[in-house]
Image: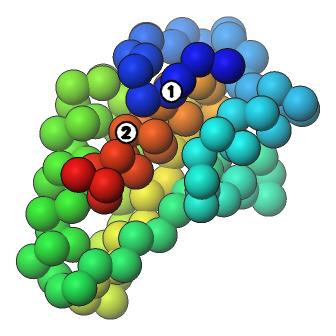
Amino acid sequence: MPDLINKKCVPCEGGTSPLAGAELDRYISMVRGWGLSTTRDSIHKEYIHPDFKKAMLFVNAVAMVAEEEGHHPDILIFGYNKVKITLFTHAINGLSENDFIMAAKIDELINE
């Protein structure tokens, strides 16, 4: 499986099948700490920051990556320092490789 961090998101058209079965299991194993929804059509992860300002800086950095990749997550800010990111591919109502590319790139923001 290619290194997700070095890949680019590609436009996804309706009619493409979402990832499923063993293929989906392989992808989820490549992104540490990301959970798979019970319906297996989205992934999510919660990030806890020291304060509100750092949480907002993280959200802004995620927004920049999302714009560069053309693949946009759902972002929930709660508490004063928690951010939950949910990824799925709207065009296919499920998961595509793009979601896992974004997950890897978002995680990289924490490691910078």
Give the image location of residue 60, x and y in percent.
15, 54
Q: Amino acid at mark 1?
A: Leu
Residue 104 in sight from this viewpoint: yes
Image-quadrant location for residue 69: top left
Q: Secondary structure at mark 1?
A: helix
104 up-or-down from 16: above or below: below
The residue that appears at 74% across and 17% down in the rendered structure is 17
**Residue 4 disc label:** 1
Return the mark for residue 80: none
In the figure, 36 relative to 93: above or below?
below
- For image coordinates 23% across by 52% down, the residue present is 112
Element on which disc 2 rests: helix
Neighbor class of circle 2 (other Cα within 10 Å; few <14, some 14-19, many 20+) is many
Image coordinates for residue 90, horizontal then vertical, percent: 52, 32
Q: Is residue 57 left or right of residue 96?
A: left
CB contact under 8 Å: marks 2 and 1: yes
**Where 37 falls versus 69 (above or below)?**
below
Q: What's the CA distance linking mark 2 and mark 1? A: 8 Å
Residue at the image point whose x is 59% and y is 61% from the top: 33
Q: Is residue 69 shown left or right of residue 74? A: left
Please provide percent x and percent y for residue 58. Answer: 21, 61
State the residue at coordinates (80%, 59%). Answer: 38
The residue under label 2 is 105
Which is nearer the eye, 30 or 64?
A: 30
Specify few, some or many for label 1: CA neighbours under 10 Å numbering under 14, 14-19, or 20 or more: many
Residue kind at label 2, given as amino acid type: Lys
The residue closer to the viewer here, 46 or 93, is 46
First in sequence: mark 2 vs mark 1: 1
Where is residue 48? Give x, y as percent: 36, 78
In this view, which residue lies farthest toward the right?
21
